[in-house]
């Protein structure tokens, strides 16, 4: 079995897969147990943003990049108030941070936020297993005494029902509406505020990342955020000029039970609509397409996506375990973007209407600015509607 890099120490954490495979290592962060789906992320930076991305609800993240924790943590990098990912798996134990922006250490931050970490694992072996067998269900335990009930851990992993059919958007969404005016980070001021009247946008929060809202504000939008369960009447009561559908976790078909009727109501009102990630999948469902669970999903900041309309290739950030089945797109809806890794759908648009969405995360700046044009396209569609 793979062990912690310090062979003299007893393992203080255990990762148990549903098939009975066990990985032992050194625990850090919170003490306790968690059960979730295991995914891997190939990004070399942004571990704090990944842990606080609400789209990772119900998932433990294996980081393929070994240096996790080396830049510490800072409140500026939180995508939501607290970590949402259930836990983290790393190759090397987090070191003391060395970065001018660091306001704290990753291990202490995880402990304070109630999230478990395990270090010293063969993450390459683990990643290969996920790629070959699909994202497994796991139980992750951290106990400083090194005592683990292995049979119980494996049983918990096997007993977990998984993400298919699970609506998690309600769990991570805001509970009441709020306004957003903070813009993207810029040197040397940092985050600044948008001032004056702007394009009125309602953003539906299925687990929205803060940087998406910042990008909307930077594009000139006056943003009102509504909970995931908002109805079409709730949305239209805000008198929006455009509606944004956010990212989020879980099975889009499950969240679609209440989201699809709302989106169809907004489409009937003939408003510009822009969706990202789960919002993209929701829009596809509302238009009549279907979504399917992927083998191991896409999680990373280096995913090449081709814009089918310009031929341009964007380097994108992705985080999704479900995908839109492009074969089910109805007439009048075209595929606009495709993954160059596996050909899966990465974008759609309604012919002749300012209604579009993408599977990837343009706000995460992996390109670094390859995909920001999408926010500008949304703003332009609202300005054109206002002018008409």
Image (spheres, grey):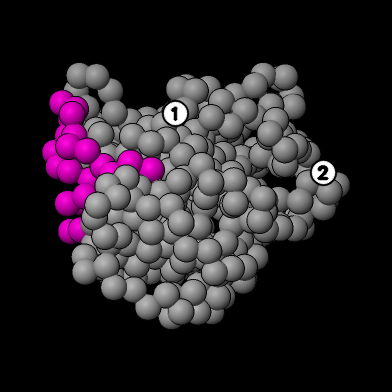
The reply, left or right, for residue 269 in relation to residue 175 is: right
Residue at 47% across, 63% down: 22
Residue picked out by circle 1: 365
Residue 209 picture location, percent across and down:
39, 46
Calculate the distance from the C-alpha at mark 1 to the C-alpha at mark 2.
30 Å
Residue 260 picture location, percent across and down:
63, 63
Checking the image for residue 162, the label placed there is none
User: Which is more toward the observer, 29 or 201?
Assistant: 29
Q: Secondary structure at mark 1?
A: loop
Q: Is residue 306 above or below residue 6?
A: above
User: Which is more toward the observer, 106 or 173?
Assistant: 106
User: Is disc 2 surrounded by few (<14), some (14 to 19) or many (20+) residues within 10 Å?
Assistant: few
Question: Does the magenta stretch mainly form a helix, a strand or a loop?
Answer: loop
User: Which is more toward the observer, 75 or 280?
Assistant: 75
Q: What range of the chain is rendered magenta?
A: 89-118
123 within the magenta span: no
Tell me if I can see residue 84 in this picture.
no
Q: Residue furthest front?
A: 8
Q: Secondary structure at mark 2?
A: loop
Q: Nearer the viewer, mark 1 or mark 2?
A: 1
Residue 305 picture location, percent across and down:
65, 29
Tell me if I can see residue 182 in this picture.
yes
The earlier-in-sequence mark between 1 and 2 is 2
Residue at 55% across, 75% down: 158
105 within the magenta span: yes
Q: Is residue 118 above or below residue 219?
A: below
Residue 127 picture location, percent across and down:
54, 46
Q: Quadrant of residue 363?
A: top left
Residue picked out by circle 2: 332
Residue at 29% across, 50% down: 7
Q: Quick one: quadrant of the C terminus?
A: top right
């Amino acid at each position: 079995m793979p062990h912690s890099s310090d062979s003299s120490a007893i393992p203080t954490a255990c990762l148990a897969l549903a098939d009975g495979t066990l990985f032992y290592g050194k625990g850090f962060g919170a003490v306790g147990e968690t059960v979730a789906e295991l995914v891997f992320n190939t990004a070399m930076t942004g571990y704090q943003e990944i842990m606080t991305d609400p789209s990772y609800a119900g998932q433990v993240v294996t980081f393929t990049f070994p240096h996790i924790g080396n830049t510490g943590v800072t409140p500026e990098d939180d995508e939501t108030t607290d970590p949402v990912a259930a836990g983290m798996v790393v190759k090397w134990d987090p070191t003391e941070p060395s970065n001018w922006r660091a306001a704290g250490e990753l291990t202490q931050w995880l402990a304070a936020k109630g999230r478990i970490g395990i270090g010293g694992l063969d993450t390459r072996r683990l990643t290969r297993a996920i790629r070959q067998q699909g994202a497994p269900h796991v139980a992750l335990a951290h106990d400083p005494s090194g005592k683990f009930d292995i049979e119980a851990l494996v049983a918990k992993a096997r007993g977990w029902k998984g993400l298919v059919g699970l609506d998690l958007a309600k769990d991570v969404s805001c509970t009441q509406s709020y306004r957003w005016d903070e813009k993207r980070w810029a040197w040397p001021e940092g985050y600044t505020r948008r001032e004056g009247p702007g394009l009125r946008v309602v953003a539906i929060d299925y687990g929205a990342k803060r940087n998406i809202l910042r990008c909307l504000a930077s594009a000139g939008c006056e943003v009102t955020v509504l909970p995931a369960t908002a109805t079409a009447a709730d949305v239209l009561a805000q008198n929006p000029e455009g509606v944004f559908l956010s990212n989020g976790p879980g099975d889009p078909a499950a969240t679609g039970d209440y989201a699809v009727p709302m989106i169809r109501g907004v489409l009937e009102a003939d408003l510009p609509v822009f969706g990202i990630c789960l919002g993209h999948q929701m829009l596809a469902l509302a238009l009549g397409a279907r979504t399917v669970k992927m083998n191991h999903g896409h999680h990373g900041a280096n995913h090449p996506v081709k814009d089918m309309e310009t031929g341009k290739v964007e380097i994108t950030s992705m985080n999704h375990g479900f995908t839109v089945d492009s074969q089910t797109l109805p007439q009048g809806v075209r595929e606009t973007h495709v993954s160059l890794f596996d050909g899966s759908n990465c974008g759609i648009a309604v012919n002749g209407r300012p209604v579009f969405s993408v599977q990837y995360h343009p706000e995460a700046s992996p390109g670094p600015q390859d995909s920001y044009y999408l926010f500008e396209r949304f703003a332009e569609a609202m300005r054109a509607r206002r002018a008409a």
